[in-house]
Image (spheres, helix red, strand yellow):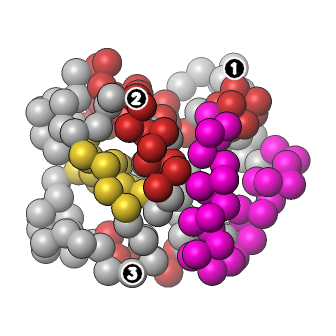
Amino acid sequence: MSGEQKGFYGDQANTVEPDSDRLKRFYTPQPVSVTKADYDDWASDYDQNTVLDTGYCAPEIVAGLIEKYVDDKSQAIVDLGCGTGLLGKILKPKGYTQLEGWDLSPGMLAEAHKTGAYTSLNEIDLTVALPFDAGSCQVMASVGVYGPGIVGPEHVPLLVPPLAQ
């Protein structure tokens, strides 16, 4: 990763989110139903507001890690909190063929569908037990989901049971 790369989460020195009332709202704890409605509202201009306006590049970083550690491009990759499909848009052209997108927001899922990158798209609430069998997932990715106001660190243990040993 080049030290020249800009954008929030793009380098170690630039980890402060942009000054945006909308983004600040998403980093404030709120009920799941409110978060869902807010993301539905934001879906159509999410990519513009994050990637284009602020240089958000976390999906590129995660895609690079997947390329480094996942050799079998036909292996299922579960994209939790896939949003508009930013990660899928990067991975599909690199040859990854089994991308499963999961998100809280139907509006975000509709945008992810437009990418054509995902083999399936489903609604999910990441604050409750995940709907996967124990040990059923080899690869999970979750970009920009876990943090204050979105899905808290207390929900990270919910990821463990579905992961294969």
Q: Secondary structure at mark 3?
A: loop
Amino acid carrying label 1: it is: Glu
Q: Quadrant of residue 65?
A: top left
Front one among 1 and 24 = 24
Part of the protein shown in magenta: 18-47
Residue 126, label in figure? none
The residue singled out by tag 2 in the image is 115
Helix, strand or loop for the magenta stretch, by majority: helix
Where is residue 34 shown, x and y percent of the image?
65, 72
Mark 3 vs 1, N-terminal side: 1
Is residue 89 located in the magenta-colored stretch of the structure?
A: no
Amino acid carrying label 3: it is: Val
Could you give the CA–CA distance between mark 2 and mark 1, rounded to whole angstroms?
29 Å
The residue singled out by tag 1 in the image is 4
The residue singled out by tag 3 in the image is 128
- Neighbour class for label 1 at 10 Å: few (<14), some, many (≥20)? few
Contact? badges 3 and 1 (CB < 8 Å): no
Mark 2 vs 1, N-terminal side: 1
- Tell me, yes or no, if residue 16 can be seen here: no
Where is residue 138 shown, x and y percent of the image?
16, 53
Where is residue 143 shown, x and y percent of the image?
48, 49
